[in-house]
Image: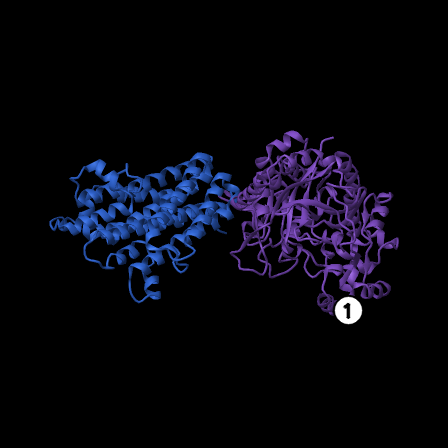
Chain colours: A blue, B purple
Amino acid sequence: MLGRTANGLFWMYRYLERAENTSRLIETGQRIALTRSGVSDDEWRPVLQSAGGAPAYDAMHDAVTRDLAIDWLLRSPDNPSSVLSAVAAARQNGREVRTALTEEVWEATNGAYMTIKKLLARKVQDRDLPEVLASIRQHTALVRGATHGTMMRNDIYDFSRLGTFLERGDNTARILDVKYYVLLPSAMSVGSSIDNVQWDSILSSVSARGGFRMAFGNAGGARDIAQFLILDRRMPRSLAFCVGKILDNLGYLISDYGFRGEAIDHAEALAEHCMSTDIDAIFDRGLHEYLQDVLLRLGMLGRQIEIDYRFSG
Amino acid sequence: MSEIRHFDEMWGRTEEVRGPYRELDGWIKGEDPARLRAKQREAEELFRLTGITFNVYGRDEAEERLIPFDIIPRIMSGAEWRKLCRGIEQRVRAINQFLYDIYHRQEIIRAGRIPAEMIERNAAFLPQMCGVNPPGGIYTHIVGIDLVRTGEDQFYVLEDNARTPSGVSYMLENRETMLHMFPELFAQNKVRPVSNYPTDLRRSLAACAPTMTTGRPTVAVLTPGIFNSAYFEHAFLADQMGVELVEGQDIRIIDGRVAMRTTCGYKPIDVLYRRVDDDYLDPLNFRPDSQLGVPGIMDVYRAGGITIANAPGTGIADDKAIYSYMPDIVEFYTGERPLLENVPTWRCAEADAFAYVREHLHELVVKEVHGSGGYGMLVGPTATKKDIAEFRKKFEARPANYIAQPTLSLSTVPIFNRAGLTPRHVDLRPFVQVSPQGINITPGGLTRVALKKGSLVVNSSQGGGTKDTWVLDD
């Protein structure tokens, strides 16, 4: 496979994952805004931070308002992580690697782009927002489904998966980092209803409310949430899960290609330092410091993959 | 114009349905027009989803347009097709011999059949190709011969596309769409398949591999990238052939071979089907500012390390000024009379021709010698007085830049629109593959149709559409 093709696949799936994550964050923000009694736009700042690119937002706007934040996250061409930008970038990368995709994956991607572009051609009205968000997720899910159902399990698939899980791990870590203080043991003592809303928002930004309830019932607290989203390997958006998948896929590439690059060393170090631990040790070390370390390591791992597999000349 | 009675390929001149269209006619009569209209819309959806779009130059980069597709097929009998094939084969063989000659001893010039300046002062002539022997002796591996029809037995070659004929993906996708939408039609008519094209092409290209190739030749398609208007086709062909789609940035010269950067290191390419123009192919040998090509590829080529399809410099054979010499070229190299006719052509560089053409602009088709895509062309009979006056200024300033031809009464084939079946002018581009093993012509081709009433310009950039083209197995 061409190095450029590996690069295109990697980024196509990163952007798809990102589009989905951004839409999930909007949904969470909206949910909090609707469930809180006092009407305030405060909740949108952390959402912008989780989605990345808050400084770019501030450069364009004087204040954070609900309307502006939603539009920024959904449609802004100045925001590379907006749903529209991410879907367009995914499709652009998909076009570049058209020959590596099955017809079904390409058509699902192209279809997602066409529908989402139409849905987001204009500012989305309040009453249409839930439907638009549902449609976005449905379309990215179609691409994922076509990927699972029709793609050969070869290097093409491995690079797609690497992109998916690097992006997902990165997103989960960032969501946790923006709200890490809510999860600190000291915050448990507060135990007010506000914190419940905050916990709830963290879980729903990674579609984990149901999973968490299944694992912990209604008894789970902040510590359990952190444990669940960082170390639980059953949870498909947890850091440990993503790192596990990255290790798997790098392993397949090594046995396929018959050579071992350096990326696997980075991934193994990440697993060893950050995933083979328990949540109390993470709290002792400092949750924020821990998450910063994970983000840094994920970044380095991504760059090493690009080097190992000759993404560019 | 309207007084000319056009030959219609379905109804002939007599309103009696011609043989190849009889089954289709019966089928259409039994169909509900509303269902056909729905099918026409469905076809459009299918094309949009597959992403068969083209970028229009000079427009917003994001804009991708669909070439309109018409659901009524264009049908030829097996006998009509076989006759055309003989003519096409003869012509393609002559073109390859002409190219070899032009880049070697230039016998045709010595024999006085073509003036030397037609070659030497032609921008499409590449002095760098002189004395180079392309692997297998083939210059133009993939050819599209544009034909028009004016009567039951009268075909003309409108133009030869010897450098990079495009449109083959439409031939294939049009057929796929028809099969998908009207399977019953293919049960009623025995239509020869076109779907072997990619497999045949890969085989044909592999047969042209340089002699130093060991094992199964590695073929790749070279594209300028996703912003090229034909990118969809490049990706489509690479995908269908099961070969890599490469860009200049993927390629480097290593140990005298052209090699592509794969995830496991550099891998040599044996045959490169390039969809990048000569000028951009090699910044070391041609345009130094090109980002699209491969520095040094020409040196590898000259040393026999790679096959480039089509060979650099083939443009000299499809230049519009050379076109007028094609009957001589065919005769000179094959020793036979040309089986396919050329449209009579005035070379406006010649004083007599210029004098005639300037007096008759209103009835002629005048084309730029180096133009393509229907840009910069005058169709006298349908042009307004203002169009002609504006064109005259450009024309008289640089007559040598133009050729002129009589306005042919192109055949029509019905399209399906609001009024039902309505005749529209068409042309035909059959696709030809050439290798040392022989010449292969895919039964069918790309039928382009001028969707505007009375229009003779079929180019997609000028509002033309396409049709599925059937050759019956009889």
Q: Quadrant of residue B82?
A: top right
Q: Position of residue A173 (x, y in %)?
A: 29, 49
Query: Can you name the residue that lies furthest to the right here?
Result: B111
Q: Position of residue A154 (x, y in %)?
A: 46, 36
Q: Is residue A194 left or right of residue B449?
A: left
Q: Nearer the viewer, residue A291 or A94?
A: A94
Tag 1: residue type? Glu
- Residue B213 to residue A184: above or below: above
Indicate the chain on which mark 1 is placed. B
- Residue that appears at 46% across and 38% down: A155
In this orientation, does residue A309 appear?
no
Query: Can you name the residue that lies furthest to the left here?
Result: A189
The residue beneath circle 1 is B396
- Residue B155 to residue B374: above or below: above
Q: Nearer the viewer, residue B27 or B383?
A: B27
In this orientation, does residue A156 appear?
yes
- Residue that appears at 29% across and 51% down: A174
Q: Is residue A113 left or right of residue B466?
A: left
Q: Nearer the viewer, residue A284 or A180?
A: A180
Q: Position of residue A49 (x, y in %)?
A: 29, 56
Looking at the rendered image, the quarter that the N terminus of chain B falls into is: bottom right
